[in-house]
């Protein structure tokens, strides 16, 4: 007999990947009915539809169509819409991922409705409250019923804020699950290297989307200038907002930078796996580079994945063209283990923990 419904809130590309493997685990367990709410934070086909299609993510029951506004607008509108769904569905749990506006909206709506909340990728901290993502992470963690951390560092961060005990579970990283599951599929289905005429280890893969970089034209110029020093072609799948900022700024994209449209997850896996190096301001891509054994240069002043920097597989360079130039020359990946974020069973452990929590709550209510 079904134990009830879990509402999953997603809205951005990284969340689609994470939810793909957890939804798969829900389906395999068969005890809970998962229903997906898509806020619409990433709404065009390249940023959204392709992920649902190629990762076989269950079709969202609700498409809220909320995106394009300010952080406060997106969060407020999504929170109001999600609250209505929660009151109608009366779920056993609400599940949120990561650190986006959609994450915070789902978290606050669940907390206000007194519905248990599970946060996947809890405990991450950059310790920079200027970042909207940092605010989203902290607030979501402090209203969560179950906190699924990807690492010991994340678990310690929560303990330092007074969040500890059975509610905090280090399950490893669902992104590692995804890399293992979809890596083999990518090898069979992706033709991105051939279509872009790229040789393995003959290019640098770059991503650039954070507001701290795109809305500060000095930083944006420094990053593009640094990428322009690479002796190899730099493949840059360009986020729509970043593209608009480059046009507004008048910054000239260096000739060695190959700007392409955003790609799906399978193509991204193949680009990461075959890159000489990855340069990114994305938290998820930092980890994916590590999973693939590829050196990473992080285009930020700090990272929530500090253990990767300490391990020597990731280097923080900020937006300095000179620092980026130096970092792009280093290609050796240290001889380190690639299982720092679990064994690839994180998604199943999450589903089992949610089921146990529901069982305990129902038993206490008898």
Image (cartoon, rainbow, N blue to C red):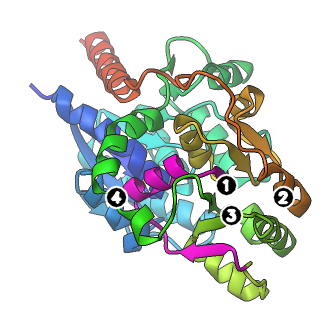
Examine the image and state in which quarter residue 69 appears.
bottom right
The mark closer to the camera, 1 or 3, is 3
From the viewer's perspective, tell me whether residue 142 is left or right of residue 319: left
- The circle on residue 120 is none
Q: Position of residue 228 (x, y in %)?
A: 77, 70
Q: Do residues under tags 1 and 2 come within 8 Å of each other at their CB atoms? A: no
The mark closer to the camera, 1 or 2, is 2
State which tag comes first along the sequence, 3 or 4.
Answer: 4
The span picked out in magenta is 255-279
The residue under label 4 is: 190
Q: Do residues under tags 1 and 3 come within 8 Å of each other at their CB atoms? A: no
Real-space Cα separation, disc 4 to disc 1, in angstroms: 22 Å
Residue count near mark 3 (Cα–Cα under 10 Å), binned few <14, some 14–19, many ≥20? some
Indicate the secondary structure of the residue bearing disc 2: helix
Q: Nearer the viewer, residue 275 or 103?
A: 275
- The circle on residue 325 is 2
Residue count near mark 4 (Cα–Cα under 10 Å), binned few <14, some 14–19, many ≥20? some
The residue under label 1 is: 280
From the viewer's perspective, tell me whether residue 137 is left or right of residue 261: right
Real-space Cα separation, disc 1 to disc 2, in angstroms: 14 Å
Real-space Cα separation, disc 1 to disc 3, in angstroms: 16 Å
Q: Nearer the viewer, residue 111 or 156?
A: 156
Residue count near mark 2 (Cα–Cα under 10 Å), binned few <14, some 14–19, many ≥20? some
Indicate the secondary structure of the residue bearing disc 1: strand
- The circle on residue 232 is 3
**Residue at 59% in and 23% down:** 151
**Residue at 91% in and 59% down:** 322
């Amino acid at each position: 007999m079904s134990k009830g419904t879990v509402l999953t809130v997603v809205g951005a590309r990284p969340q689609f990947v994470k939810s793909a493997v957890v939804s798969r685990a829900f389906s395999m367990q068969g005890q809970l009915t998962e229903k997906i709410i898509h806020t619409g934070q990433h709404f065009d086909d390249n940023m959204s539809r392709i992920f649902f299609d190629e990762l076989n993510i269950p079709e969202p029951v609700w498409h809220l169509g909320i995106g394009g506004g300010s952080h406060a607008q997106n969060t407020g509108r999504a929170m109001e819409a999600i609250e209505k769904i929660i009151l109608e569905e009366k779920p056993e749990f609400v599940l949120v991922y990561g650190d986006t506006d959609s994450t915070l909206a789902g978290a606050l709506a669940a907390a206000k409705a007194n519905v248990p909340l599970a946060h996947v990728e809890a405990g991450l901290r950059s310790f920079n409250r200027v970042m909207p993502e940092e605010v989203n992470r902290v607030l979501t963690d402090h209203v969560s019923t179950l906190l699924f951390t990807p690492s010991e560092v994340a678990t310690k961060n929560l303990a330092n804020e007074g969040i500890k005990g059975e509610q905090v579970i280090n399950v490893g990283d669902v992104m590692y699950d995804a890399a293992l599951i979809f890596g083999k599929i990518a090898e069979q289905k992706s033709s991105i290297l051939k279509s872009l005429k790229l040789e393995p280890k003959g290019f640098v893969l770059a991503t650039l989307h954070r507001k701290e970089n795109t809305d500060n034209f000095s930083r944006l110029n420094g990053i593009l200038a640094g990428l322009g020093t690479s002796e190899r072609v730099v493949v840059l799948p360009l986020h729509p907002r970043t593209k608009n900022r480059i046009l507004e700024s008048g910054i000239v994209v260096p000739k060695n930078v190959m700007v392409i449209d955003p790609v799906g997850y399978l193509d991204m896996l193949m680009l990461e796996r075959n890159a000489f190096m990855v340069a990114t301001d994305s938290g998820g891509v930092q980890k994916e580079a590590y999973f693939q054994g590829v050196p990473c240069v992080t285009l930020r002043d700090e990272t929530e994945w500090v253990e990767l920097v300490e391990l020597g597989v990731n280097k923080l360079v900020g937006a300095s063209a000179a620092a980026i130039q130096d970092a792009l020359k280093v290609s050796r990946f240290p001889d380190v283990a690639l299982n720092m974020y679990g064994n690839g069973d994180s998604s199943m452990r999450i589903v089992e923990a949610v089921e146990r929590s529901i069982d305990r709550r129902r038993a206490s209510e008898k």
